[in-house]
Amino acid sequence: MFAKQRPGSLEVICGPMFSGKSEELIRRVKRALIARQKVQVFKPAIDDRYHATAVASHSQQKLDAVPVRDSSDIRAHLAPDTEVVAFDEAQFMDEGTVALCDELADRGVRVIVAGLDQDYTSAPFGIMPVLLAKAEFVSKLQAICVVCGALASRTNRLVHKGGQVLVGAAEAYDARCRHCHEKPGAGEAGLFGDAQEG
Ligand code: ADP
Ligand code: ZN
């Protein structure tokens, strides 16, 4: 509990949609700002749900963020004296983001990443499983299942079209527990193109 802490680590906040990942990311960043640390916040440009240049939660909290296309874009924006780097929707980031997170943490930067650990088929989403394996600190959040009220670990897609990525909020997805989560039907692709069964 009180062991010495050296600066530089990777924190991952994961869980389904509506579990409070963005809220938690915003909370951590706000506290770092209160501590007068130099913070840079990014978000993948693919996610334009609410505001092009903000991390936004479903509960209307917001934080200014620089939209980026990929990890090289983040590199180009990084200030040399940055102490905290945070980004949301990490499941949409490219593979180079893993090495970047490692490099930053090795250099003494506190890296805070939030993202969906599972896609709507409940398969591991993008680079998230690798980031989870590499992280010193993992917070796995749960939402509330809209069907039964239990804790919800999964994101359920309400519209039956599109591939793994279909950006949207309440109209396209809801949160479900394991038991109420709907398995995708035949022809709906999972992470590696294979629909999950049964
Ligand atoms: P995430 O980033 O994980 O999608 P947000 O931080 O954007 O989550 O939003 C979390 C907020 O969503 C909650 O504080 C709550 O106000 C709202 N919310 C809406 N539906 C649900 C649900 N089914 N379970 C929990 N919270 C929900
Ligand atoms: Zn349920």
Image (cartoon, rainbow, N blue to C red):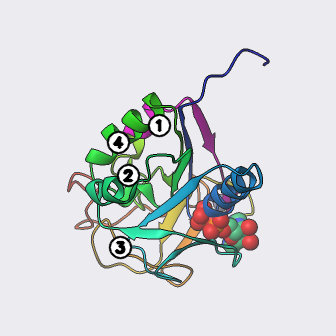
Q: Which residue is mark 1?
A: 132
Foreground label between 2 and 3? 3
Give the distance between the C-alpha atoms of the residues marked 4 and 1, in whole angstroms: 14 Å
Instruction: Specify whether 166 is left or right of 163.
Output: right
Q: Which residues are magenta?
A: 130-146
In this orientation, which residue lies closer to the viewer: 48 or 16?
A: 48
**Helix, strand or loop for disc 2:** loop
Look at 61% across and 62% down and name the residue there. 22
Position above or below: 146 against 179: below
**Helix, strand or loop for disc 1:** helix
Give the distance between the C-alpha atoms of the residues marked 2 and 4, in whole angstroms: 18 Å
Discs 2, 4 touching: Cβ within 8 Å? no
Residue 99 is drawn in which quadrant? top left
Q: Dot 2: few (<14), some (14–19), or many (≥20) neighbours within 10 Å?
A: many
Discs 4, 1 touching: Cβ within 8 Å? no
Of mark 2 and mark 1, the one earlier in the sequence is 2
Which quarter is ligand 2 in?
A: bottom right
Of mark 3 and mark 4, the one earlier in the sequence is 3
Look at 54% across and 31% down and name the residue there. 8
The kind of residue tagged 3 is Ile
In this orientation, which residue lies closer to the viewer: 142 or 96?
A: 96
Of mark 1 and mark 3, the one earlier in the sequence is 3
Look at 69% across and 79% down and name the residue there. 60
Q: Position of residue 27 (x, y in %)?
A: 72, 57
Q: Position of residue 123 (x, y in %)?
A: 38, 50
Give the distance between the C-alpha atoms of the residues marked 2 and 3, in whole angstroms: 15 Å
Instruction: Report the disc number at residue 125.
Output: 2
The kind of residue tagged 1 is Leu
